[in-house]
Image (cartoon, coloured by chain):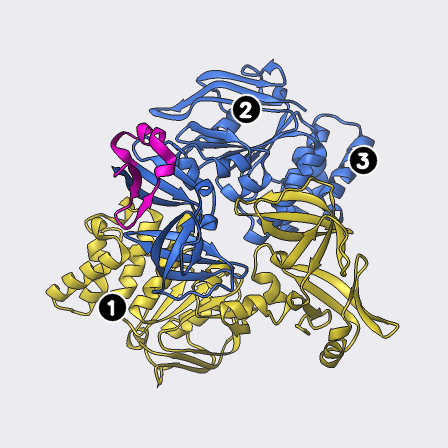
Amino acid sequence: MARVMVKNLTKKFGKITAVNRLNLEVEDKEFVCLLGPSGCGKTTTLRMIAGLEVPDEGEIYIGDELVNDLTPAERDTAMVFQFYALYPTLTVNDNLAFPLRTQKTPKDEVDRRVREVADILGVTKILNLRPEQLTPGESQRVAIGRAIIRRPRVYLLDEPLTNLDAKLRARMRAELKRLQKELGQTAIYVTHDQLEAMTMADKIAVMNEGVLQKYDTPEKVYNHPNNLFVAGFIGSPSMNFIEGTLKEMDNKLYLDSGEFRLDMTELGEPVLGEVKGKEVILGIRPEHISVGSKPLAAYAFQGEVYVVEPLGDQAILDFKIGSSIVRAIVPPYFKADVGNRLWLSFSKENFHMINKKTEEVIL
Amino acid sequence: MARVRLKDVTKRAGAVCPVFNVNLEVADKEFLTLLAPSGSGKSTILRMIAGLEVPDEGEIYIGDELVNDLTPAERDTAMVFQTYALYPHLTVKDNLASPLKARKTPQNEIDSRVRDVADILGISNLLQKYPTQLSGGEMQRVAIGRAIIRRPRVYLLDEPLTNLDAKLRVHMRAELKRLQKELGQTMIYATHDELEALSMSDKIAVMGNGRILQYGTSTEIFEHPKSIFVATFVGTPTINLFECVLSEKAGQTYLESNVFKLNVTELAELIRDRASGSEFILGIRPSDLEIHTEKPREDHIQGEVYILEPMGAVVVIDVKVGEELVKVKVPGSVTLDLGTKIWLTFDRGKMHVFSRKTKEIVV
């Protein structure tokens, strides 16, 4: 059990800066996800914490100990990979026992711990099988079991669910999250899947091109993105982005998208003052748009239904606004046909204003 | 443009997954999806329609023409595969033009058709590039463009979006659906992704083990699954299932599990009419369950909050009921502490009762 801290961590591969001056503090017992597209530096960060990569600059602390100069084994972390990496010739029982045997743990303790871990992960019935006889879900559980059996100070997980099918992934997500809470151990989890990060993490570190974009709770990351990248990366279907220009006319402030105009006078002068060139992007999440035959909230514009996507317990309406698509989530019984002209409404609490040039969120 | 009909088509084991007694009718201009886990024979059906496989039994009609004895070229279909199969040494423009050149179409017509198709798919700015310079989404668009440039009678698409990342898949889903409507051409689409099937199709044929198990619209498949297989295959998170017995006491009929007891007297006659035995499985979708923090008067299922999976717009609450986990999908604003005692209720119209023996729907 330990907190993990990295300070000004930097790693370069040739000309590419994989991780750029990263500062991150993971509390004891916390579950932190490093989230970002491939090449964002998340795996490199994890490998530096594990001791598998040497940083060019910066410090890594586990507990209160500076671990830069420690070997991977001395750091006392356990890593789970995307590929299960089980020993094919050993039974599940022996795969689980392996980390303890290498530490020369007494036999009766090994047996007891294997039983315990098998019980937690629901793999008791398969202890005598070999890896080739297991389903992917079972293999991944055994791999996780092998990581937790040793009670290291920190668990490091690198996309452990990526190779599982969608249904199993959804189930394992909940199981892993609960397991981490029950074990009460610090976990750092790398993923490119924003849904995994949202559902599992206490905190999410969103990374892009080696740079930390935002580090906060899922709720804060989702509801209060700080820039265009974070706003677009988190959430599915993605946040709608509508480009426009802020214009002053007759003592009023308007946002002009080219297709529609919204009176945004209530936002006032401060907003306008922040936007040099007045080019902005309006960001609205699909679930925050109310659709109807008339305006339903303070802000509203019209659009023509382009595609209707029923999804069982909800539906997505795609609207064509100029050359871009705006998506809105509606209940499954909502009746709309392609070509219908409808109002899309949203309230002040539910949109984001982004400076087009700096890509930072203004409001 | 043409309807497609399969009559008692069987293809026994061989190089492809077998299919048995498939009867299917796809109306002209319809978007039909074959939805099934991998290895269920959906590609086999597409390949038989295209003429790449020969059925052992049965008849295949395109339009009103029996095509069993026609060559693939004579059948006039176009197929798009999961892997894009573009010519690496040709530019996007020449890749698009290749099906027309093979048919000796006049050069000026080729040019105008390439421009049209590039415009529809938004790839006009890529025409001079080579496949290696394209992103995954761009390659898939070119592959689709090459299929549609020829205006065949039927489009056959075999998991065309599977290799794209999640965001792009959501985007392409809507685009493909719209494109099919604009072209007004019959399309048969194979996928293992239930969301693709629900969102895009006019009709869905759910397959398992080489057979068509259910055929209907998205709404029919989602709201009225005929079997446990279909009910669990479609819908995320997966439908909750409870093993129950039908019992009687003082003139009232109950569905009883080891964790709850529901009065189903109103349905008793119907259930007994349609199924023998007393063992049933009750299915309720996560979005059809309602959470109460105080004990409700009506029949309920009692449990405690096991884990929360926030997803932004919605949150999935995993509720521990006895030894089972029940998933409940509620709006994203709901928060509850782990361990909180809660009660679940649901609208009787939303429950599905399956026979435990046959796994088929009863009510």
Query: What is the spatial separation of the Cα atoms under label 2 and label 1, in whole angstroms?
Result: 55 Å
Given the image, on which type of amino acid does mark 2 rest? Ile
Q: Secondary structure at mark 1?
A: loop
Colour applied to chain B:
yellow
Instruction: Mark 2 vs mark 1: tell me if same chain.
Output: no
Sequence-wise first label, 3 or 2: 2
Question: Which chain is depicted blue?
Answer: A
Q: Is residue A137 above or below residue B103?
A: above
In the image, which residues are magenta?
A250-279
Query: What is the spatial separation of the Cα atoms under label 3 and label 2, in whole angstroms?
Result: 30 Å
Q: x%, y% of residue A93?
A: 73, 41
The residue sitting at 78% across, 69% down in the picture is B279
Q: x%, y% of residue B106?
A: 12, 68
Front one among A234 and A33: A234
Q: Which residue is mark 2?
A: A49
Q: Is residue B362 left or right of residue B235?
A: right
Instruction: Mark 3 vs mark 2: tell me if same chain.
Output: yes
Camera-nearest label, 1 or 3: 1
Given the image, on which type of amino acid does mark 3 rest? Arg
Q: Quadrant of residue B211?
A: bottom right
Q: Quadrant of residue B289?
A: bottom right
Camera-nearest label, 3 or 2: 2
Q: Is residue B337 above or below residue B217?
A: above
Can the viewer see residue A149 in this picture? no
Q: The numbered mark 1 sits on a residue in which chain?
A: B
Query: Tag on residue B150?
Result: 1
Q: Residues within 10 Å of mark 1 (few under 14, many from 20)?
A: many
The residue sitting at 72% across, 30% down in the picture is A100
Query: Tag on residue A112?
Result: 3
Q: Is residue B108 left or right of residue B237?
A: left
